[in-house]
Amino acid sequence: MNNSTSRPVSHVDVLIVGSGPAGSTYARTIGDAVPSVRMLMVEVGPELPGVRGNHTQNMPDEERVAAQLLTQGPDAGIERAAAMSDVADGIDPSVEFRQTILPGLFFAGRRVVREGEVGLPAASMSSGVGGMGIHWGTSCPRPNQSERIPFIPSEELDAALDAAEELLGVTKLTEAGGVTGALRDAVAEVFDGPGLTPTMFMPTATQVTENGVTFSGTGRILGTLEDRVPGFELRSETLARRVLVEDGRAVGVELEDRRTSEVYRVSASHVIVCADGLRTPQLLFASGIRPRALGHHLNEHFQVGSFFLLNEEFDPARFEETSTLASVIVPFSDTRPMQGGVISLAGSPYRLPFADDLAQSNLGVMAWYGAKDIRFEDAVEFSETEKDFYGMPAMDIRYSHTARDLETIEGLRENSIRAAARVGTLMEEPQLAAGGSSLHYQGTVRMGPSDDGSSVCDPLLRVWGVENLQVGGNGVIPTSTAANPTLTTVALAIRAARALADDLVSASSEAVSA
């Protein structure tokens, strides 16, 4: 890996802040199109053991734990509790929707909840090479109906989603044997109907190999970029303190080496900020780039989950084979603004920190996501005076539930009960997860069709009012969604990166002609 604590370059064509899925997609797409590009990617977190950008689920146990402990920012080295509560005899599960903080993550902001608001007390982030791309759950559903971005032509969005699926190595099953296939048919009986997106199997960025299931991490996105693009460098433990702007144009970034506290500048023809849905607006704020919509329209889909016991009809012991990849998804529809998931834990490829062998377990997970009623008032705000662990403007989250939100949450509970009634028995009442625990924070640097004050960037993720500055990540998604956002985020980054690559090629041609 080409990494250095020195300053080998003082100017680059492209400087990317953030090494997660969005930043890596920009780097890969630009590098593929323009192999001669000089490109610097900076990551505030450390290098990790093993293969660069590898998903933690692919790592040996010792290496995975080490990686998780390294990416916890101010909590680095602090081991997380293994589980929250007992839900079945002999089984002490700990899955994402039950926890408010996960291994590898740390809480965002000061977690202050104002009177009359609900906040996002479990909002979390990760700091390490690969970003959340080494921890994510790999679910890759496509957006449906009003989840789709209306001002991007449908055929263009679909082409970008196709490219994102290829880049991430998404597996899309149309059929599945074993208990999951039977569950899909049963759930469809309850939830399919006119105008509703049909029940299907969840597409995931996973692949079955001779060695088992492989999870796509950021390393898959970057691929062999460093071998093919000699001008690419990924610099870890490097904080982007502010984007440098002169005469309305981004001209570079002020950086800090967190190992030595050295502060220096790198000039750049193009700057791309892909820190995450909370830290991208933070960096823009620190840089004095403060469009009206910055940090506002924050939304995270609601999450209601519960464990259930499968009916005898779906007992894995009754089936000769069980798919290791498939789970059931009830996709979002406008008349049902939520996404449901029904998962049998039998044969799960995920390394869950409880029972060693779930091959014949009749335990399942019910998880429903609901779309948020988007409001300008829901926002991440930044202090002019107080600083966070990294010395950046301290953040506070303003977040409330509307009457429509409360109806959606009740609908999530009702649909959890409906689904369970067909396939099993709930072991507990469906519970709304702590705000922020889905880890999907959208809207804070949202795109829009025009610079009317309601968005931060244009459809190609170019920040309004600042030339040569682009953003990326979940924060650019402007619609209310229940679908997991990573596929859409990668698709939007591909579109934006292709446009930037075309600009680089044109600029190079003009320079040669001159």
Image: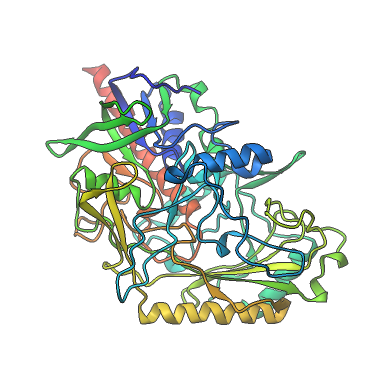
Dividing the picture into quadrants, the one containing residue 212 is top right
The relative height of residue 123 versus residue 69 in the rendered view (above or below) is below
Q: Is residue 83 visible to us here? A: yes
- In the rendered structure, the answer to whether residue 207 lies left or right of residue 499 reads right
Residue projecting furthest to the left = 247
Model colouring: rainbow
Residue 280 horizontal/vertical position (percent): 33, 47
- 196 and 353: which is toward the camera: 353
- In the rendered structure, the answer to whether residue 152 lies left or right of residue 49 reads left
Q: Is residue 192 visible to us here? A: no
Dividing the picture into quadrants, the one containing residue 322 is bottom right
The relative height of residue 185 versus residue 218 in the rendered view (above or below) is below
Residue found 41% across the figure and 21% down from its top: 4
- In the rendered structure, the answer to whether residue 185 lies left or right of residue 305 reads right
Residue found 42% across the figure and 68% down from its top: 146
The relative height of residue 295 versus residue 128 in the rendered view (above or below) is below
The relative height of residue 168 versus residue 383 in the rendered view (above or below) is above
- 451 and 117: which is toward the camera: 117
Residue 379 horizontal/vertical position (percent): 29, 62
Quadrant of the image for the C terminus?
A: top left
Residue found 56% across the figure and 52% down from its top: 80
Residue 325 horizontal/vertical position (percent): 70, 54
Query: What is the total number of numbered labels drawn onto the structure image?
Result: 0
- 403 and 490: which is toward the camera: 403
Dividing the picture into quadrants, the one containing residue 372 is bottom left
- In the rendered structure, the answer to whether residue 418 lies left or right of residue 506 reads right
Residue 394 horizontal/vertical position (percent): 28, 51
